[in-house]
Image (cartoon, helix red, strand yellow):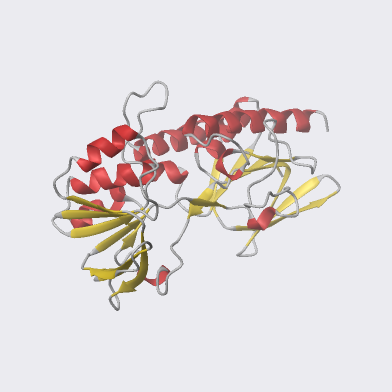
């Protein structure tokens, strides 16, 4: 039996693993995707203390290496549910694998929000992407579009403008919601075009994306854009569906628990972007991880 199981290997989960290991607890981290979480999609991180500038991928590798060096065990799996019997938590994965622990920290973060269009999921990796730093080079010298108007979308668009022939930014509002500094940088790029009050209505192409249809919500005018790539940056959805029995969820699906990261179920904790909070940043995810780990250690020590 493991002392603590951490579900999710983003900054919150890996920080929790480091803190728990340092407290002398055995730790198993279960991750269904890539280790490092959403930070791996950030081309440049400039707000993490101690690193004036670092790529998200590099920072994620540092988090992962640190957790392993401290003694955490990492494995890949998709958790379907958490069961409890006599104070012991059983974490059940979709492949039938089960793990037991004295405490569980849910740090599953959030997934990319989709546009909700026909064949969208089929075209992911075949023209549709969420990460300019990961996939931007595939579209070097080509025409691309990006949907979104927040900081993430603006950063992605700036990066794409450095390698792509043209970048069309599609925002459903009348203006951008990201930082004015990023807006200034983007709008000065000669190969960038911005469409406001506009939504994507359909995806073109059979096996690969060849274009999109867009509609202006004010005029009702529709038009077709020939693009080789479409980057979607319209927010995140919390990955908490599997934990509704052990975590109180708010109407948006986030774990509705306080700064102590404690669930209403003893021995269950939540940390990071899956938790209801006012600020979701790299530093607050790490803070959650440390708080949840220390709370879980205290819970075990008092058993």
Residue in front for this viewpoint, 232 or 247: 232
Where is residue 137 shown, x and y percent of the image? 21, 52
Question: Who's the residue at 17% across and 49% down the image?
Answer: 163
Question: Who's the residue at 47% across and 33% down the image?
Answer: 282
Where is residue 77 shown, x and y percent of the image? 56, 56
Where is residue 172 shown, x and y percent of the image? 39, 56
Q: In screen coordinates, is 194 left or right of 254?
A: left
- Of all residues, the one furthest to the front in this rendering is 219
Q: Is residue 98 visible?
A: no
Residue in front for this viewpoint, 230 or 272: 230
Q: In screen coordinates, is 205 left or right of 16?
A: left
* Vertical side of 92 occupied by 153: above or below: above
Looking at the rendered image, the quarter that the C terminus falls into is top right
Q: Is residue 239 visible?
A: yes
Residue in front for this viewpoint, 242 or 191: 191
- Of all residues, the one furthest to the top in this rendering is 50
Question: Who's the residue at 68% across and 49% down the image?
Answer: 250
Residue in front for this viewpoint, 133 or 1: 133
* Vertical side of 112 occupied by 274: above or below: above
Where is residue 191 shown, x and y percent of the image? 15, 50
* Vertical side of 80 occupied by 19: above or below: above
Picture quadrant of residue 120: bottom left
- Of all residues, the one furthest to the right in this rendering is 86
Looking at the rendered image, the quarter that the N terminus falls into is top right
């Amino acid at each position: 039996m493991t002392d603590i199981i951490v579900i999710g290997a983003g900054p919150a989960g890996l920080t929790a693993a480091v803190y728990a290991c340092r407290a002398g607890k055995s730790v198993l981290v279960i991750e269904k995707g890539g280790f490092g979480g959403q930070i791996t999609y950030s081309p440049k991180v400039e707000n993490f203390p101690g690193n004036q500038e670092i790529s998200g991928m590099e920072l994620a590798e540092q988090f992962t290496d640190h957790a392993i060096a401290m003694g955490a065990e990492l494995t890949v799996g998709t958790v379907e549910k958490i069961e409890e019997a006599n104070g012991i938590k059983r974490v059940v994965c979709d492949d039938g694998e089960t793990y037991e622990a004295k405490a569980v920290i849910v740090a599953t973060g959030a997934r990319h929000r989709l546009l909700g269009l026909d064949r969208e999921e089929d075209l992911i990796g075949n023209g549709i992407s969420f990460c300019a730093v990961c996939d931007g080079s595939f579209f070097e010298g080509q025409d691309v579009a990006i949907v979104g108007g927040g900081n993430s979308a603006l950063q992605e668009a700036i990066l794409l403008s450095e390698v792509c022939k043209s970048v069309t930014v599609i925002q459903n509002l009348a203006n951008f919601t990201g930082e004015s500094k990023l807006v200034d940088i983007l709008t000065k790029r000669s190969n960038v075009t911005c469409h406001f009050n506009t939504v994507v209505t359909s995806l073109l192409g059979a096996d690969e994306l060849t274009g999109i249809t867009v509609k202006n919500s004010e005029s009702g005018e529709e038009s077709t854009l020939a693009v080789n790539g479409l980057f979607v940056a319209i927010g995140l959805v919390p990955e908490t569906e599997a934990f509704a029995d052990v975590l109180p969820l708010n109407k948006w699906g986030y774990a509705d628990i306080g700064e102590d990261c404690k669930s209403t179920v003893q021995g269950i904790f939540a940390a990071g972007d899956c938790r209801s909070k006012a600020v979701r940043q790299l530093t607050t995810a790490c803070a959650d991880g440390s708080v949840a780990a220390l709370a879980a250690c205290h819970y075990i020590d008092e058993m």
